[in-house]
Image: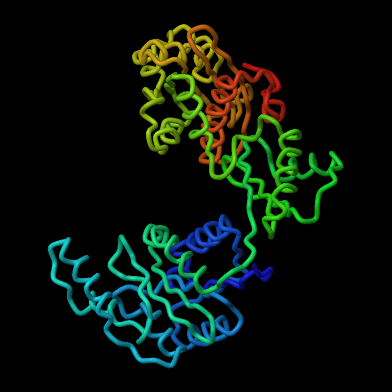
Amino acid sequence: MSSTTPTIQLLLTGNEIMSGDTVDSNSAMIAQYLGEQGLGVTRKVTLGDDPAALRTELEQLARSSDVVIVNGGLGPTVDDLTAEILAAVAGVSLAEHAVARAHVESWCGRRGVVANAANLKQALLPAGCDIVPNPIGSAVGFQLTVQDCLVVCTPGVPGELRAMLPQVLANMERHIGSFTPGDVLRLQTFGLGESTAQQIIADAGLDWPPEVELGFRAGAPQMEIKLTVRDRVHVDAQRQCRDALQSLFGDHIIGEGGTTLAQRVLTLLAEQGATLSTAESCTGGLIASMLTQVPGSSAGFHAGFVTYSNAIKSSVLGVSENSLSTHGAVSEPVVVEMVEGALAKSGSDYAIAVSGIAGPDGGSADKPVGTVWLAWGNAQQVHTRGLCWPVERTLFQTMIAAAGLDMVRRMLLGLDTEPRYFKQRSQKSAP
């Protein structure tokens, strides 16, 4: 095995990316996918639909790379230039590729249309190129070796790119040959910020091995901690670092890989043969949405009640008018009754309820914007907590929905410790 890590660079094309009309998520998708295989992207370049600039850049990338992945510009319109540019760089002509034409005609035929000249433009490819199958879209991918560099051209539609990446990787590995792969271990956490996590690690004075790279990816609602080794001979050290982080962060770690809070909750419900329902006000059904994004969620998720108005809280969930008038919708008694109503209406084993002030208006001195009450539990026990999370409305909803799922996760695991964000976000005086 070679110890040399292959050089992989990206070229993203399209005026729509340069103007901001389309957000480039494809380069992140490619980098994350390759990273899971122990391969890293060393450079990425984004250019508009300028033939001269694209040709110059691709020539330079090919001279300094083992692999270049070009993304975008494979479609039927005049500004889709990738095939033309690669042909020019390789010094070959464009020619109709029989496999590509058959693919376009089949794609059109399944939609009941005849392939026109614009469609068939997608079959004009650099002479001598190999096809990279596209199982979804009309434009095939293609690849050609230029100056010992494999140039792989992929479509800009994210779903099509995602479906093609396994084949792209296989083709890359055949071109690269033997090399020593690395490994990335990803830990998913909730309730920790980057600065907090870094400070906890620094304060612990860990004897961190130089072979393990520590990285963070902040997000909402979760934060990812990455432990990267450039050679898999160091996976034992990587695991030791993982164990050290487990001892520091404990139950703030949800799981490894791409695990989400919703996935973890549904897994725990399945293991215990239990079910969950939600009663939401300020989050507007977001908790239910997070759960139902997970395939097979119907096994553990029974019902979601979006009871935004006081009248619906009463008529659907049985929240008493006395509780609403005396304490207000954003209060401990109301969320307790929302949980009880959700349990009774759905017959589920567990329920979450949230009611808060998402803003930007609606706050008061006693209940400022960001105030929220959470309740979670079962027929035997309902827990509550009042928090204040004064952030932008959408972020507030995301974080509160995640906090609700996190509390159910903790209950299912039998954890009796409070998360760090309770201390940070608890109301100074509960209403």
Q: Where is residue 57 drawn, in percent x and y?
A: 54, 83
> Residue visible at 51% across and 41% down?
394
Q: Exactly how many numbered labels are in the figure?
A: 0
The C terminus sits in image quarter: top right
- Residue in the foreground of this view, choosing between 368 and 112: 112
Above or below 352: residue 219: below
Task: Name the side, left or right, on which 322 lies relative to 239.
Answer: left
> Residue visible at 35% across and 91% down?
93
Q: Where is residue 389 drawn, in percent x and y?
A: 62, 32
Above or below 207: residue 288: above
- Residue in the foreground of this view, choosing between 370 and 260: 260
Task: Name the side, left or right, on which 220 lies relative to 192.
Answer: left
Residue 359 visible:
no
Residue 294 visible:
yes
Task: Name the side, left or right, on which 181 lies relative to 46.
Answer: right
Q: Where is residue 92 drawn, in percent x and y?
A: 39, 91
Give the quarter of the image for residue 233.
Answer: bottom right
Q: Where is residue 170 drawn, in percent x and y?
A: 46, 65
- Residue in the foreground of this view, choosing between 406 and 205: 205
How is the protein colored in the picture?
A: rainbow
Above or below 30: residue 61: below
> Residue visible at 12% across and 63% down?
112
Give the quarter of the image for residue 412.
Answer: top right
The N terminus sits in image quarter: bottom right
